[in-house]
Image (spheres, rainbow, N blue to C red):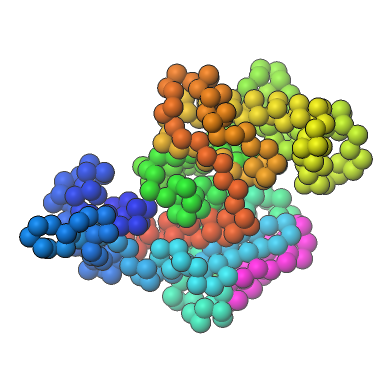
């Protein structure tokens, strides 16, 4: 109920009961507990006219400063972090240049501590006022156990990072991978706000996916699901980074396009992935037929990925995200037409492309902390 009210900005008791298929009595009871705990409040309903009897209609809304969280994004070159209140308003932000692309756990924890200290300093808050810390980065991350099996940022494997940071800060810490934190950023701050069921598909150095079902991020039984990039689109097809063949990623991700570009285009320095993608995009825009063909072919696989999401999950909305949106996005209408050709349910789902600025990462990490803190504080309020 808290998530529903938060997602919609405000909601009347009757709309909440209808949307969540629970009785009006249950909504009234839970609302009373959440109000008593200082988590939600009553406001004048902005979506309804005053009744003829003159009593202003009432809606439920989240109390903005009922708790605070920190969101941290760790990256190869530059880490970023924000401190927000319970509705996600940014109260302080900071960044830190990473001193090396790969580091030991101790060095990473030191960098995290610096970011936290800086945020507390800027906001004038103390550690005890922070309900949760969310940390997002690339890698194989088990959110449930807080373990990093592997990450391009770390020299070590199988690191219980959430525990280590939690002990040091005396605060609950939650970690997750990039695709999930982008999805949480959309759920809390982006186009997913107010949508109960939506998917995010990310295309850049890899192909990722996030899924929100009933206002919550879906992770699968072991948190290892939704690896859209490694679903097979061709038996015995192109070799993927994962070592298997025929993965969607092997036809759609940046590295696949760069490999192809190196074979057919005269691009001198294809060493750095981003630079090579920029060169390929420039060649395509200036009318190079080989470069255009590479993007056209990749977009066919993009449509295939989207169509499979529509067919499997029937979401209200799919948000396309990731660096690729800067280079090559088929027009929305065209995309819809092409997806329709591969699906049985036509026009059922809206598809939008969202090119975020750099703030998406720290926002996503704060949304991870907000989700966890919401669970924690609402559970506490009911005990
Ligand atoms: Zn693969």
The number of callouts visible is: 0
Question: Could one spot residue 248 in this view of the protein?
Answer: no
Question: Residue 189 versus residue 283: which sits nearer the camera?
Answer: 283
Question: Residue 102 versus residue 308: which sits nearer the camera?
Answer: 308
Relative image position of residue 382 (x, y in whole percent): 25, 61
Quadrant for residue 254, please give it. Answer: top right
Relative image position of residue 87 (x, y in whole percent): 40, 63
Tell me which residue sits at (54%, 63%) in the image. Answer: 71
Quadrant for residue 11, please give it. Answer: bottom left
Tell me which residue sits at (69%, 68%) in the image. Answer: 96
Question: Could one spot residue 28 in this view of the protein?
Answer: yes
Q: From what the image shows, is residue 81 above or below residue 254? A: below
Relative image position of residue 257 (x, y in whole percent): 76, 33
Relative image position of residue 8 (x, y in whole percent): 34, 53
Whether the magenta-drawn stretch holds residue 112 is answered as yes
The reply, left or right, for residue 33 in relation to residue 61 is left
Question: Residue 139 versus residue 40: which sits nearer the camera?
Answer: 40
The reply, left or right, for residue 285 in relation to residue 46 is right
Tell me which residue sits at (52%, 28%) in the image. Answer: 336
Q: From what the image shows, is residue 371 above or below residue 256? A: below
Split into 4 quadrants, where in the image is the C terminus? bottom left
Tell me which residue sits at (59%, 43%) in the image. Answer: 321
Which region of the structure is painted magenta? 94-118
Whether the magenta-drawn stretch holds residue 13 is answered as no
């Amino acid at each position: 109920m808290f998530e529903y009210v938060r997602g919609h900005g405000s909601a009347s008791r009757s709309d909440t009961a209808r949307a969540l298929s629970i009785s009006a009595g249950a909504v009234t009871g839970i609302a009373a507990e959440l109000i008593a705990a200082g988590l939600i409040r009553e406001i004048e309903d902005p979506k309804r006219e005053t009744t003829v009897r003159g009593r202003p209609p009432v809606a439920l809304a989240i109390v903005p400063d009922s708790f605070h969280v920190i969101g941290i994004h760790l990256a190869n070159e530059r880490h970023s972090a924000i401190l927000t209140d319970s509705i996600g308003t940014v109260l302080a932000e900071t960044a830190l240049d990473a001193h090396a692309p790969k580091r030991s756990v101790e060095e990473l924890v030191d960098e995290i501590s610096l970011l936290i200290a800086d945020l507390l300093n800027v906001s004038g808050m103390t550690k005890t006022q922070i309900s949760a810390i969310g940390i997002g980065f690339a890698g194989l991350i088990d959110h449930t156990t807080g373990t990093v099996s592997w990450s391009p940022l770390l020299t070590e494997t199988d690191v219980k990072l959430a525990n280590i940071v939690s002990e040091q800060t005396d605060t609950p810490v939650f970690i997750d991978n990039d695709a999930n934190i982008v999805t949480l950023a959309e759920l809390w701050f982006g186009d997913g706000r107010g949508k109960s069921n939506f998917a995010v598909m990310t295309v850049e150095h890899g192909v990722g996916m996030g899924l929100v079902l009933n206002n919550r991020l879906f992770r699968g039984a072991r948190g290892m699901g939704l690896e859209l990039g490694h679903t097979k689109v061709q038996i015995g097809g192109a070799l993927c980074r994962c070592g298997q063949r025929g993965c969607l990623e092997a036809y759609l991700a940046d590295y696949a396009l760069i490999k192809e570009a190196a074979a057919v285009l005269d691009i001198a320095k294809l060493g750095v992935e981003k630079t090579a993608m920029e060169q390929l995009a420039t060649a395509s825009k200036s009318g190079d037929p080989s470069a255009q063909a590479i993007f056209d072919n990749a977009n066919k696989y993009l449509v295939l990925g989207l169509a499979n999401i529509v067919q499997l999950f029937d979401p209200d909305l799919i948000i396309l995200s990731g660096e690729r949106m800067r280079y090559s996005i088929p027009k929305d209408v065209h995309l819809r037409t092409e997806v329709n050709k591969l699906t049985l349910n036509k026009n059922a789902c809206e598809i939008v492309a969202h090119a975020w600025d750099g703030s998406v990462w720290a926002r996503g990490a704060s949304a991870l902390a907000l989700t966890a803190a919401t669970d924690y504080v609402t559970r506490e309020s009911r005990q």
